[in-house]
Image (cartoon, grey):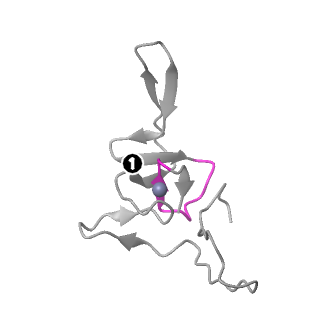
């Protein structure tokens, strides 16, 4: 569908050997009481960012006091997915590194 990875759901246990699931593509978005979108995996909203596709692209460079360099696609409240994917997923959870 033109996306790299799309989170559809997770199950820890099944009640029987018959697996019968309904998967929504993309998953149905749920909001917390503050109206913020929550992650379908961790159930939290604090690391969820709206995805921005296409240009411009931002890669934020962070250099730690020890000199380690890390890169982040998160800038100004958005997760910049770039131009190599076409927007089925609407949100990104930085904690779980998933798109949904
Ligand atoms: Zn999450």
Q: Which quadrant: the N terminus?
A: bottom right
The residue lying at 45 percent from left, 36 percent from top is 58
> Which image quadrant for residue 62?
top left
The residue lying at 55 percent from left, 71 percent from top is 26
Callout count: 1
Q: Position of residue 44 (x, y in %)?
A: 38, 59
The relative height of residue 16 versus residue 55 in the rendered view (above or below) is: below
The residue lying at 40 percent from left, 53 percent from top is 49
Q: Is residue 52 left or right of residue 9?
A: left
Give the farthest residue toward the left.
34
Instruction: Name the residue carrying label 1.
Output: 78
State which region is magenta: 83-95
Q: In the depicted view, which residue is nearer to us: 77 or 53?
A: 77
User: Dot 1, how many residues are within 10 Å of its Cα: few (below 14), some (14-19), or many (20+)?
Assistant: some
Q: Is residue 32 left or right of residue 61?
A: left
Q: Position of residue 59 (x, y in %)?
A: 48, 33
Q: In the depicted view, which residue is nearer to us: 96 or 25?
A: 96
């Amino acid at each position: 569908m033109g996306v790299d990875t799309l989170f559809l759901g997770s199950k820890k246990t099944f009640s029987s050997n018959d697996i019968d699931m309904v998967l929504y593509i993309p998953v149905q978005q749920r909001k917390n009481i503050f109206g913020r979108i929550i992650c379908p995996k961790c159930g939290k909203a604090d690391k969820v960012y709206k995805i921005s596709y296409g240009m411009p692209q931002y890669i934020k460079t962070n250099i730690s006091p020890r000199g380690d360099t890390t890169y982040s696609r998160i800038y100004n409240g958005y997760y910049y997915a770039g131009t190599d994917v076409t927007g089925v997923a609407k949100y990104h959870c930085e904690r779980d590194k998933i798109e949904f």
